Amino acid sequence: MLTNKIFIKKTRLGGVMKIVREHYLRDDISCGSMACVKNCQGLEREPLEESPDSDSSLLRKSHYIIPDTNVVLHQIDVLEDPSIKNVIILQTVLDEIRHRSAPVYKRVTEMISSSQKHFYTYCNEFNMNTYVERKPGESANDRNDRAIRKAVGWYSSHLKDAGVLVLLLTNDVENLKYALSKNLNAYTIYDYVKSLSNKTIVDRLANPLNQSISDKNKVLFAEHLGMAEIQKGIRSGKYLQGTILISRENYLEANVSIRDKDQMVFVQGLQNLNRAVNDDVVVIEILPESEWSCPSSMVLAEDEGKDEEDEENRGLNDSEKLIQNKVPRELRQPTGRVVGIVKRNWRQYCGILQPSILKERTRHLFIPAEKRIPKIRIETRQSDALASKRIIVAIDSWPRNSRYPLGHFVRCLGGVGDKDTENEVLLLEHDVPHSNFSEAVLSFLPKMPWTITEEDLKRRRDLRHLDICSVDPPGCTDIDDALHCRSLSNGNFEVGVHIADVSHFIRPGNALDQEAANRGTTVYLTDKRIDMVPDLLSSNLCSLRSGVNRFAFSVLWEMTPQADIISTDFTKSIIDSKASLTYAEAQLKIDDPNASDNLTKSLRGLNHLAKILKKKRLDNGALSLASTEVRFFVDSETNDPIDVQTKELRETNSMVEEFMLLANIAVAEKILKEFPDNALLRRHPSPPVSNFDPLIKAAASKGFKIDVSSGKGLADSLDKAVVPENPYFNTMLRIMTTRCMMQAVYFCSGMLQPMDYLHYGLATPIYTHFTSPIRRYSDIIAHRLLAVSIGADASYPELLEKTKIQSLCNNLNYRHKMAQYAGRASVNLHTHLFFKTRVQDEQGHVLFVRKNALQILIPKYGLEGTVFLNDEGQKTSSLFVYDEEMNTQTAGNVTIHVFDPVIVQLSIDRSNVQHMKLSLKLVKPEIPGFSVPSVKDTSTLSTQEPVGKSAQKKRKMM
Amino acid sequence: MAGMELLSDQGFRTDGRKPNELRRIRFKKGVFKQADGSAYLEQGNTKVLAAVYGPHEIRGSKGKALHDKLLINCQYSMATFSTQDRKRRPRGDRKSQEMTMHLKQTFNAVVLTELFPKVQLDIYVEVLQSDGGNYCASVNAATLALIDAGIPMKDYVIACSGSFVKDTPIVDINHLEESTAGAEIIVAVLPRFDQIVFIEMNSRLHEDHLSRVMDQVMNGCKDIFNILNQQVKDELCKKAAIDKLVDAG
């Protein structure tokens, strides 16, 4: 192994330090080609195909592609196209990419590891044939270009006998010239891509920078400052650095949150925003106080009807008009303008093409779904095909003379309104990682057929003889918990909660683990599940299905019939679930007086204990809160929803829940004892008293007093607040209470004081998540911690480091929140699909009375909507009079209070293609000039034009 | 992702070595005429000079003498120009004192000390250029110097370092790897007996990985031993052949 190393010194001058590093050159690096006849050793399987078909009209022979750094960096979307295969990524290129863009680097490494793409990394820097030394006076970039050419040259001669060509793709004119002078095959990426028979790929080309200098030399924006000037300015305090957040209501206004300071600076107008896109890190200069401004209350949406040319000519003039200095002095906020950009945080955006009058033209405007992102100019030849399609676009640049940023088409998601497309959109918009698992991840799955070995049996407690069963919602395939209960000879009960042993299959630190940690949680959409771990684990090996042996992590208690815990035991085990029941089936078994088999007895025992546990918990001050969950009945053929129902809750639901809580708390106590510094726990901070104001006010209107001083007081007073004639009143109060709560979050125990560990909602001083490791990563960590503390598994460094655990928690919290939002958006989407074809009257209740709107809860669908009382667009004075004291709205002789029953009409507002909305109109109580007639009365009601004022609705759910 | 990638996805370290590969080793014995034994050794960019004097009578206070065995006196020092920034390094600083102690312990274990009671052996080690693995290079150079001086020993003492990067053990780490990778393990062994005479670890390494790193480092030691032994033997044979010629007249 030590032969053939030629020694060369590599010197790097930085500052005044001279660094000398060894650099070994080798002769044993494989070229990675199947076609190679030169006997390159070293690889099990060469990634490059023997004779790839050429698709290009430039070069009819089979060839490999070697792109240079800038091509990879800027045209990554092209390289990702499935038709581009057999690419050699040189080490020089990969290193440069690593330094310049982490996201691109990640995408490149993913392509390299995929076996379909036939990408290969050639370590040219370590090869004695392709290494080049930097010449005196040569810049690093020139050296790298030369190294790339040298490697291309080597490849050409190396593969000459094999009959495969290599070609260099570069956009650098110099580089191209040199390459051609050395008789290498070299093209620009534009020429090459255009020569391919697959024409759609052309649209994926990023805009070449030189093309963007358009004919009109009109400069619209001020120049951005250079890095050196920015740094000088920041140091002297002349400029401030921060992240720009464009307003959701008005794309011409933004706030910049200044780094290291608790201050927001306002920026207004296209000119002052100076090409900053939402989320960019920018440098701003504060304007003189006389030019300070404040956010206008206007909601500004770019009008869509106008032709593109219009907008071009319009330039910046009209936006300039906005900055009129009529703002009253007391309202003025510190206002600034963007002078430079430190870091662009551009990502890919979803949206649609703006319909253009001239169909033939190739330049189009793209309207992102996210209102805070400006329109993007793209070039495409397939505008016909892309009209009314959801597409993804990436921004390439924003030159000074263009009103819009320039971008390129990445891919098409599908038709607008199509369910799969809309699902994809909502996953993208909520940043849910949903691509298929990469091969690297799948390689860490256990090999099938999977068997239990002797070794496994020795290390686990055998619980296969117990009558264990699982209880889940219907159609559940990722079963992560199962239960059992049996009476002991001393009159006590043995209760066991068995959780899928996911941590047995997912070993720390490997690709599978990293992927799961990144995904954080399984995301449940109404008709789809985005798994956190591959299907083989989630619905097979880890899922505690009945009739098969499965690994579990068990918590076993001995309990008295009064549900007092005598002892707790944790163990890794093997179980054999006797039945996978649904909540309804389990309920039937419990209720069936004739059934007396072991399983039923076990269930009855569990149910009995659960009731006592629940009572104890509620006595302790745990809150039972309400939120409505809906279930869609889906047409089996079209997959369109045909009916909606709120989910039913049975005794068995709360039975399972009770034992899961018990297990979680037991585990939390155990791991905190063993790992006081780095246990992953979950807390729910108690909300500040002021949060409860709306609740107290609402309850007071019905004559109830809510005690919010403690969880217990709150729970009790909620229990007492019952109005016999309105059975839904109590539920609504609980829904309101939910709104007052804080978010529950994961945290690392070493980062907070013990008194902050409290879980307010469950009224327990400590809590964690242990019971759903298939769908939550937090539970996997809890499993690992518990396994270490009972000596069943080894720990690893990351597990014991509290900062690592905390940063993991931060990611989990973010993913969790996004998963929740995505789930809600999915329900929203289905509601829209459901009401697409119908207009319906429904019974509802007023949940909140606002200054200009009523918030209505519709129990049947579990949805909440807003009836706007005065339309902002119209100047007519409102019919309604708002009484802030009493919290009522009065119109004529009708007064609307909180909790009043109403009837509303539901339909879809299609005025905006990107964001369809559910609109609510008041039917009852009748208010002349405002309410609409019931559907039954007017059979000829059109869905397009509402009879009353168009009321808009923005749905918000908890 | 930024920062140094010590082990690339293709399985190469920053300097082009595979995880189990050593740096280039070159050495020369008998570089000084004055000393009884001496050696110059390069392990990559780490360059060390070792000189051995003795066994000779105790210098300084006679009280130091051990009545039943040889007294080994070590001195480790680094040249001012040995590292990136030029720095005067007085002999007695803590770091070199520690290193001196380690060397002394190591050689006490291999030199057949009971053959030379009441006398002293001096081992001087000077690091001329440092690029990681100073201790290893010092031990290896001193071994060669002892061989050159003809001091009876149980076996060679060979030292090698190792670390753990990206779930892979790496051997013979250079300065860059030493300063960025987590743990560093240094082992000195008697290669023909498979005995460890010295082991040191800096920073933390999970116990699950320890045995893998140890195995790799032991292999590294064996590799170094083979290289050194081969050349020592060759030189000896050559010398013997010449001597034979001389004897034959």
Image (cartoon, coloured by chain):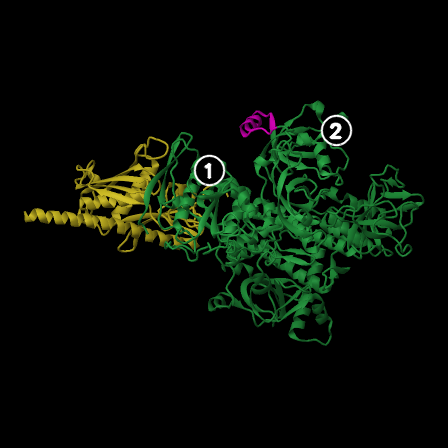
Chain colours: A green, B yellow
Instruction: Name the chain letter of the residue that bears numbered label 2.
Output: A
| Residue B229 in view, yes or no | yes
Q: Residue A589 at what x, y percent from top left?
A: 70, 71
Query: Which residue is disc 1 drawn over?
Result: A177
Q: Mark 2 to mark 1: distance in Å? A: 50 Å
Identify the image quadrant of residue A671. bottom right
Checking the image for residue A327, the label placed there is none
Residue shown at the point (53%, 50%) measured from the top left: A56
Question: Which segment is the magenta one?
Answer: A223-239
Q: Nearer the viewer, residue A607 or B31?
A: B31
Instruction: Name the chain letter of the residue that bears numbered label 1.
Output: A
Q: Residue A951 at what x, y percent from top left?
A: 83, 45
Name the secondary structure under disc 1.
Answer: helix
Name the secondary structure under disc 2.
Answer: helix
Q: Are marks 2 and 1 in contact (CB under 8 Å)?
A: no
Q: How busy is the neighbourhood of tag 2: few (under 14 within 10 Å), some, or many (20 plus)?
A: few
Q: Is residue B203 left or right of residue A860?
A: left
Q: Is residue A351 magenta?
A: no
Query: Which residue is disc 2 drawn over?
Result: A321
| Residue A713 in view, yes or no | no
Q: Nearer the viewer, residue A474 or A562?
A: A474
Q: Is residue A281 left or right of residue A453?
A: right
The amino acid type, in three-letter code, at marker 1 is Lys
Residue shown at the point (69%, 28%) measured from the top left: A334
The amino acid type, in three-letter code, at marker 2 is Lys
Among the two numbered marks 2 and 1 on one chain, the one whose residue lies closer to the N terminus? 1
Q: Is residue A236 magenta?
A: yes
